[in-house]
Each structure stands twice: as C-alpha cells, then as structure tokens.
Image (spheres, rainbow, N blue to C red):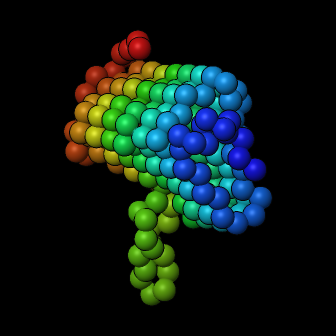
Amino acid sequence: MNPLSLIQRLKNKVKIKGSNNQIIIDDKKSLKISNTKIYIKGQNNKLHIKSDVKIRDTFIEIVGDDCSITIGSSATIGHDCYLSAKESDIHLHIGDNCMLSRNAKLMTSDGHPIYINDEVINSAKSIIIQDNVWVADNVTILKGIEVGANSVIGIDSVLTKSIPEHSIAAGNPAKVIKEGIRWEH
C-alpha cells in the first residue's frame, strides 16, 4: 500500500519489494515531497514520516529485515540527500525540527560485508539524530552515531563518533569544536 496522494506519487518514485513493508505518513496533506526515490526491500521494514516534513531530491533506502527510517515532525531533508538503513533490525531516526542541508549522507552500513574467516567484521549499526539538529552541506554520518539534541554538524564533515547535545562538530573526522550552543531555523 502506498499512502502518498496521487500528486505525491506522480512527483516521486516508490518501489517496495518483499512482505509486510510499510510507509506511514502521519499527515499526508502537510508532507511536501518531490523528486524523491523510496526503495524498500525485505521483510517487516518501515518508513515513518511525521507531520510537516519537507523532502526534496532525496534517495531513501531500507534494505533488510525489521529495519526502519523515521523522519520527525517539521524536519527538512535537502537536495541530493541519502538516507539508508540496511541489514537486520537497524534503525535510522531523525528527530523533530531537524534540518539536513544539501548532499547529506546518513548510512547505517558500509554497503557491503567484509569478512575475516567467514565472519562479518563490519556489521551495520543504527543512527540516532536527536531533535533540532542542523546537518550542513556535504556531511556524512556513519553507522553507530548518535547526535545530541540542538547540535550542528559543520559543512563537509564526516561524523565517525557520537557528539553530545548543544555542540558544534566539524572536520574529517569531525570533532566537537564548541559546546553549550543553540541554533535557530
């Protein structure tokens, strides 16, 4: 079942393979979504988009079993973003009032397994972006990261470690450069 309106279906591409996968949209009328590709493959996966969300020119991918992506209320996902939850029981959570600028990449996995003695050494890990986080242009957030509420991730940064709330992190790899901050849309 595709909960998007006719206009939303015409402006976007949605492909769902497998069983018991779902897209939940809290308020179809308040969702502004265009030129976005949504690909869900596997079993029991869920994309949950809350109210007043804006998504443009983004690729949303859920591949595996029991995985989910949640986009919080009043979030903005900018041009050429990539949101990916892969493998098994992996979750990508973007909190309320978050803003992802152009070309942000949030990836819960490395994309392909790497083995030593037939054992995977690079398993996927969930990502949590708490409320009111601003992710600037060209930022990559890797698996296992939690970004604290009211934080900012600077332009062209690669986040390889979690950061606390009310912080600015920047660089490659990103490091906390200021604490005790707040920001406004």
> Residue 109 versus residue 73: which sits nearer the camera?
73
Where in the figure is residue 106, as x and y percent of width and height? 43, 46
- Asked whether, in this view, residue 117 is left or right of residue 1, the answer is left
Where in the figure is residue 132, as x and y percent of width and height? 49, 22
Of the 4 image quadrants, the one containing the C terminus is top left
Q: Is residue 19 visible?
A: yes
Name the residue located 25 percent from the left edge and 28 percent from the top edge. Answer: 177
> Residue 11 versus residue 110: which sits nearer the camera?
11
Q: Quadrant of residue 56?
A: top left
Q: Say if 147 sits above or below 20 in the image.
A: above
Name the residue located 75 percent from the left edge and 64 percent from the top edge. Answer: 19
- Asked whether, in this view, residue 143 is left or right of residue 170, the answer is right
Q: Is residue 145 visible?
A: no
Please tell me how many numbered marks the rendered image carries.
0
Name the residue located 46 percent from the left edge and 41 percent from the top edge. Answer: 35
> Residue 103 versus residue 1: which sits nearer the camera?
1
- Asked whether, in this view, residue 91 is left or right of residue 78, the answer is right
Where in the figure is residue 88, as x and y percent of width and height? 62, 63
Q: Say if 85 sits above or below 47 in the image.
A: below
Q: Quadrant of residue 180?
A: top left
- Asked whether, in this view, residue 43 is left or right of residue 170, the answer is right
Q: Residue furthest bottom?
A: 117
Name the residue located 68 percent from the left edge and 36 percent from the top edge. Answer: 5
Where in the figure is residue 147, as x and y percent of width and height? 45, 35
